[in-house]
Structures are given as C-alpha cells and as structure tokens.
Amino acid sequence: MKTLRSRLTIVLLILPPCVSATASPGNDRALPKPEDVSELLEPVRLKHGLPALGGAVVDGDRVIAVGAAGFRKAKGSQRVTTADLWHLGSCGKAMTTTLIARLVEKRKLS
C-alpha cells in the first residue's frame, strides 16, 4: 500500500466534478477491478479545504487504483463517486506542456 500511496500522490487530480475516472471506451477485455483509494484522498481533501478530490494510479492502459472523496458542490450534501465526470478546466494546457516535454526528452520533438 505504501508504494501505491506514493504513486497516487503523483497523479492526484484536484478538480471539480465532469471526465470519468473509470471510463475506458472500446476496451472490452476483462481487467481486474481497480483498488479503491478513496480513504487515502479524504484526509488530503480536508487538509486543503477542497470540495472534492479524485485520483487514479494508471499503468499503461490499466487503471490500478481509483478513488474519489468529497461533495459534488461546495457546501453540498451529494458525495462524488469515481463514476462522476470531472471538469478539467485550464488543466489541459499544463497536461499538453508535460506531454510535449516528455516527447522532447525522448528526442521525438524539438
């Protein structure tokens, strides 16, 4: 669990709910059910005063663990789930930059 916790820290998404954490279009093969790590997310959510927090550990095309903690709306009572959609907002720019940097490191882009 300690290794999973450190890997989860790397991929936490601090986002308001609207992209499914478990969706995998076109993937019909039977895969093991991901480990639920929601209990690891709740203390982080509370510490930082976030309405909701979702996270996943992904290895290649496989989701190893996934979790969600908190509420769909600030001061709301409806809890988030891993099946909820999460709005990525302006995170797309940072994600694109990271992907480009990785391609530069692999010398596939300059």
Image (cartoon, rainbow, N blue to C red):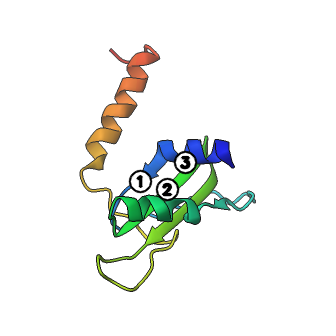
Q: Is residue 41 left or right of residue 53?
A: right
Label 2 vs label 3: CA separation? 7 Å
Residue shown at 39%/67% (left/top)? 52
The tag on residue 13 is 1
Residue shown at 56%/59% (left/top)? 40
Secondary structure under tag 2 reads strand
Amino acid under disc 1: Leu
Residue ID for mark 3? 8
Q: Are marks 1 and 3 in contact (CB under 8 Å)?
A: no
Percent x, y of residue 60: 61, 40
Residue ID for mark 2? 55
Residue shown at 45%/79% (left/top)? 79
Label 1 vs label 3: CA separation? 10 Å
Q: Quadrant of residue 33?
A: bottom right
Q: Earlier in the sequence, mark 1 or mark 3?
A: 3
- In the rendered image of this protein, does residue 74 appear above or below residue 105? below
Amino acid under disc 3: Leu
Residue at the bottom extreme of this rendering: 77
Q: Are marks 1 and 2 in contact (CB under 8 Å)?
A: yes
Residue shown at 32%/14% (left/top)? 110
Percent x, y of residue 86: 38, 64
Q: Are marks 2 and 3 in contact (CB under 8 Å)?
A: yes
Q: Residues within 10 Å of mark 2 (few under 14, many from 20)?
A: many
